[in-house]
Amino acid sequence: MRAGTEKKLYTKIRSKNLAIQHVCEVGVWLPEMSNILDFIIKDKVRTTLVEPDPKSIAAIRTYFRDYPNVGLLPYAAFDHHGTLDLVQRNASTFVSTLPYSPALVNDNYHIRQEDRFTVECRRFDELDDSSIDLLSVDTEGSEWYVIQYLKSRPRVISVEMHGKSYLNPFYTEIADWMTREGYEKWYMDKTDIVFYKKGVFAVTGAEKLELSLMAAAVRFRRARKRLGKFFSGTKEKK
């Protein structure tokens, strides 16, 4: 994040005068790129960061060394307590057993043995103390393993759900959970959908229109990417 800029998530929440006491981000990567950086630095909100990559862990500890409001949990969030095989492809770190992830779909990446590494993993109900107000999850296809074990019921949840040709492998499960637990879509961008707990604030007509237009743009972009891959594959066969 460049100096003097604010993440949209921060500006949108502040526009609703929503009180946030505990923020959590799962899948941080570089600390300066954190989706909740404004809450950490500007507002000194209590923060829990969950990140398993040793390189990112070291960077996070250095970057936030003067911020006592930040706590780091050096684990991957998955479906068991133990270890987990991850793959790192540039900025994308994902669980090796996933059916697909952004790197596999969008970059046509094929897993290489030298890109694999093993980390400690925990179920998210071991990491969640039930007090999270704002949750941001970007784990390259394994977001469902956070959502399904949530003990908190955050006021706002941001989840990576799509991007170019990619659609989250657990899109339906996440969407069904949100509906069942009383969440609705607030807004979205090229990769994330941001949900809010119904009743915590009012969504304006302009926001609803913006959501509809962005949803249509995302669907069109994904369809165009798929068509491009199809015609590219057809040419290669010839």
Image: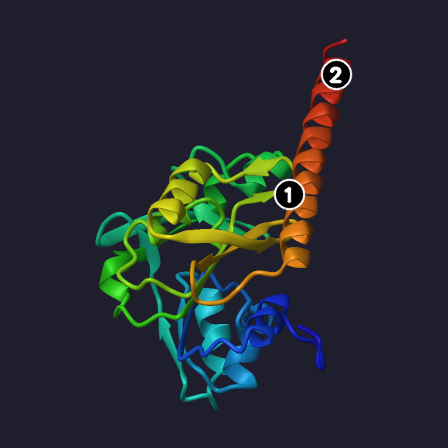
What kind of residue is marked 1?
Answer: Ala
Viewer-proximal residue, 53 or 16? 16
What residue does disc 1 label? Answer: 215
> Residue 133: percent from the left, percent from the top?
39, 70
Q: Is residue 15 above or below residue 118?
A: below
Q: Quadrant of residue 70?
A: bottom left
Residue shown at the point (71%, 37%) measured from the top left: 221
Image side of residue 226 versus residue 147, left or right: right
- The foreground one among 54 and 226 is 226
Q: Is residue 27 above or below residue 94?
A: below
Q: Quadrant of the N terminus?
A: bottom right
**Extreme top residue here?**
238
Secondary structure beneath dot 2 equals: helix
What colouring method underlies this structural image? rainbow
Residue that appears at 62% across and 52% down: 208
Q: Amino acid at mark 2?
A: Glu
Q: Of helix, strand and loop, which one carries label 1?
A: helix
- Residue position for label 2: 236
State which tag comes first along the sequence, 1 or 2: 1
Quadrant of image for the C terminus: top right
